[in-house]
Amino acid sequence: MSQQFISVEESLKKHLPEEDRKEVFRILYGRELPELDLTVGATNPLNLELKGYSFSAELEGLRPPRRVRVGLIQNSIVLPTTEPIAAQRDALLSKIGQIIGVAHVNGVNIICMQEAWNMPFAFCTREKHPWCEFAESAENGPTTVFLQELAKRYNMVIVSSILERDEDHGDTIWNTCVVISNSGKVMGKSRKNHIPRVGDFNESTYYMEGNLGHPVFETQFGKIAINICYGRHHPQNWMMYGINGAEIVFNPSATVGGLSEPMWSIEARNAAIANSYFTCAINRVGTEVFPNEFSSADGRPAHRDFGHFYGSSYVAAPDGSRTPGLSRVNDGLLVAELDLNLCRQVKDKWGFRMTQRLDLYSRSLERAIQPDFKPQIVRENMTHQN
């Protein structure tokens, strides 16, 4: 990890004069966001990177500001993948529990972890054993029970991405996010709608596309939704959460540098603009090594690691502005203070939702899914006339 590039932001700070840096940041990230005054407490045993920024909105005459603080956690695994399953999971629960405590000290109302945060991202291996042992009930599994206590203690909504075992439907496995209210109760769950079949991402070995649609959860702190990982590549997936009324959409992910990094800073930000809500992009960090080799079906040698998960978690706003990202190498907590009034203000200004023509696209899509569909292509008539 020491050989990994730390971050674009750090490189710009290091190499650009201050005046140029401010202008570059304005062009790249929109308005310059005020930094929050945060603390990790008396000690920082986790060597946690802690950053915070504030998104403001215009003051209104009829509505007070609707400020909420969200927290994004990116983290590496704790124990080697050869250790017992329970030990690996419990070590991660302990680590994340400490980070959630730091989030509480800094006033976080809603927190979300990375995809499958309580286990290594073992889906690259295509091996069922022992990785399916990490799967657990969304409603009363050990991870959910652990977080329920923290949610109630800290008055915090917690979004937890797990490998779900659905015991009511034949032990089916899903990639699922559990939404735990600040009361400590499970509000519900959202499942991953789009499953990758590219490179080492062999996730359809373990679970298939979700069947719960695009639920939005009306919490005490705002209406939230979860677009899990690969769903960020699908604009319609983002759109449906907006149609269902989301104000904040979390994107817990696990993606590596050699595959998706050029797209990472673009997709969640584009979704925030197109759908007039805040987006929170969270990526794993670190390199995870597995006992057995696996191949990518690309002719290259087999290997035991997935590549480097590059972190770089960030928050984007509906006006196109965004925070700098967390680093590519360190465990981190990103705190963002959002004024949710900005969502409606941007809708009023740009009118993207008002002008999106759902009626037009619904008719076009209905035609497109028919077996006898032909693309609407107009070609030049090349018949010669005498």
Image (spheres, rainbow, N blue to C red):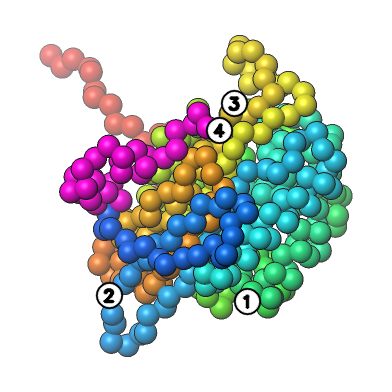
Closest to the observer: 150 or 254?
150
- Quadrant placement of the C terminus: top left
Identify the residue at image location x=31%, y=40%.
14
Measure the alpha-carbon separation of dots 4 and 2.
42 Å
**Along the polypeptide, which appears first: circle 2 or circle 1?**
2
- Residue 313 seen in render: yes
> Comparing marks 1 and 3, which lies closer to the viewer?
1
> Comparing marks 2 and 1, which lies closer to the viewer?
1
Closest to the observer: 294 or 42?
42
Measure the alpha-carbon separation of dots 2 and 1.
28 Å
**Along the polypeptide, which appears first: circle 2 or circle 3?**
2
**Residue hosting label 3:** 199
The residue furthest front is: 42
Identify the residue at image location x=73%, y=69%.
148
**Residue hosting label 1:** 155
Q: What secondary structure is marked by label 2?
A: loop
**Along the polypeptide, which appears first: circle 1 or circle 4?**
4
Magenta span main SS: helix
Q: Quadrant of residue 119?
A: top right
- State the count of labels: 4
- Residue 223 seen in render: no
